[in-house]
Image: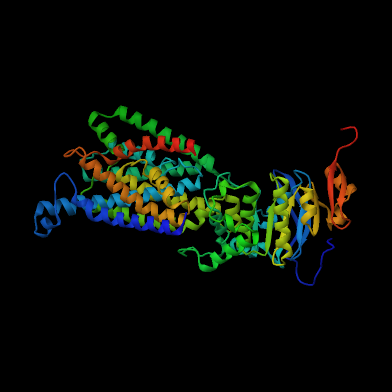
Amino acid sequence: MSGGRRRTVLVALAVAWLAVLLLAPLVGSQPVSVGDVISGDPAATTILLRLRLPRVLLALLAGGALAVAGVGFQTLFRNPLAEPYTLGVATGAALGAVIALRFADPSSLAGFAGVAVASFAGALGATALVVGLAWRKSGIESGTLLLAGVAVSLSASAIILFIQYLSDATQTFRMVRWMMGGLAVVGYGDVLWVAPWVVAGVGVLLALRWDLNQLLTGEELAASRGVDVSRLRLVLLGVTSLMVGALVAVTGPIGFVGLMVPHLLRGAVGHDHLWLAPAAFLGGGAFLVVCDLVARTVMAPAQLPVGVLTALLGGPFFLWLLLGRRRG
Amino acid sequence: MSAAGQGAAAPLVAARGVAWEAGGRCVVGPLDLEVTAGECLVIVGPNGAGKTSLIRLLTGLLEPSAGGLAWRGTAYGEHSRRDLARRIAYVPQIRPARVPLTVEEVVLLGRHPHLGRFQLAPRPEDHEAVAEALDRVGIGALRQRPVDELSGGERQSVYIAAAFAQQAELLVLDEPTTHLDPRHQGEVASLLARLARGGDRTVVAASHDLTFAALVADRLVALAEGRVVADGTPAEILRPEVLESLFGSRFELVGSAERPVPVLVLDEEAR
């Protein structure tokens, strides 16, 4: 992988990132121009600045965070199918949200915030449980971690089904809708909640990119070169879970971004995390904005939740990965 | 102890009363071992003799359950892991089967102990160290190739080059010739001999490959059940009676008197 090509790809991603930030708010079922806003049209101002711009910002943050988290987990587990939700963050969050939707009054303000708080707690609780299950005196064992993630996710899914069975149709609809994952926001509250987690989380993961590179040739060599592998694993798990947990609490689970974007970018910039991690942040953000753009216009005036669209892309992507591997 | 130089200065590495236990069983030691700067020391012994554990103790990856190690007179514990990594480079036997990097990228990984966390990219001196390592190991032509496409011998050279780029005084290798055919065994052996005799590296390797040991070693340490049972020059250790007690097999010697090469022979009744 030549340095020149990598630089070109990274610059192209940065340009795409800026382009979607500036252009995506202008696109939608209701045409709005910058001129309308400048001339003081209240409807245009509301649509552009209160609805579309925060939505695009949230998509940039969420997509970037999910893609970078995916890069970290895939390298940590040496597994191309690892993703940010592998350790049960999403199902834990869903369980928290479902409990809140069943037992709190969602029409009250406390109920609305309660769903986010409960799902954040669920995300962290599930991850803590998974890490606790894999904890040994000698450190955390990656294989056990993956198995514990599957077990906890399955259990949480079972409890979710049970609670749904106990719920009425409206509650069940809200639950299903939450689990589809979406970026519909009004104003900047959610963006301001997510931003510090994402900035801190992505910052830490970017600072760890040298250490992540060391994991590519195995833990023994990494340790011999001064990487504290068990501490690296703990930091990576902790930081990623906090960031993704905070995100899922707001957007619900948006699947496959953390899986697809890193894979596509490895083909373009290689496995070196010095390039891959920043590329994933830019590429993941731009990718999710474009997906969301399609999701909110393809069935206009109805808006498809973006999680449904990424899930629809995910299946064929797996198939493509599988066929590509067989050829390789 | 060793016939090699017992200078006034502290040895490069000194292990004193070092033992390592696993599951209530003593895998290594207690033993004393000194590594002298500039030598090429090969630790030989049968499977399960504790060679890999001893090698990992020497790199500082394993902490001894008793005794201690010192680098030029300073205990390992007083060095940070990173500090130690600037002095000791390791080429383990077991590595991931798939490594999605080019030769140059893998060699650059050897620079890790010299890099700062917030450094944005490798510095010119890192690239120089990589270029020198590729050159010294003789794999400059492979630099852009993916390591997964290389032969076993070439791949071993890449990891030795990475260890060289680490600019550590001591190179520690575990079974560097396992799974290699004779030609590649010879290449790795002559590479290590070259590096050790170049004078700027000290080499310690563990191996049950006696041909390899005979070809490169200035000094041999024989390990059996975790203990040092013989320590000396190749001429002193590579004798049929020493090897028979160590491996329980019969050997005949070819080569010269000061650098004998043992060859395994079968007993008459076994033929």
Residue displayed at 89% across by 56% down: B257
Q: Is residue A300 above or below residue B85?
A: above
Q: Is residue A85 above or below residue A270?
A: above
Left of B114 or right of it: where is A282? Answer: left
x, y percent for residue A119: 34, 43
- Taking depth in this image into account, of B207 and B193 the one nearest to the observer is B193
Left of B253 or right of it: where is A252? Answer: left
x, y percent for residue B139: 61, 57
Q: Is residue B213 above or below residue B5?
A: above
Q: Is residue A119 above or below residue B233?
A: above
Residue displayed at 38% across by 33% down: A157
- Count of numbered circles in the view: 0
Left of A198 or right of it: where is A293? Answer: left
Q: Quadrant of the N terminus of chain B?
A: bottom right
The type of colouring in the image is rainbow
Residue displayed at 49% across by 44% down: A131
Residue A101 visible at all: yes
x, y percent for residue B142: 58, 54
Left of B48 or right of it: where is A133? Answer: left
Residue B20 visible at all: no
Q: Quadrant of the C terminus of chain B?
A: top right
x, y percent for residue A105: 23, 39
Residue displayed at 70% across by 62% down: B195
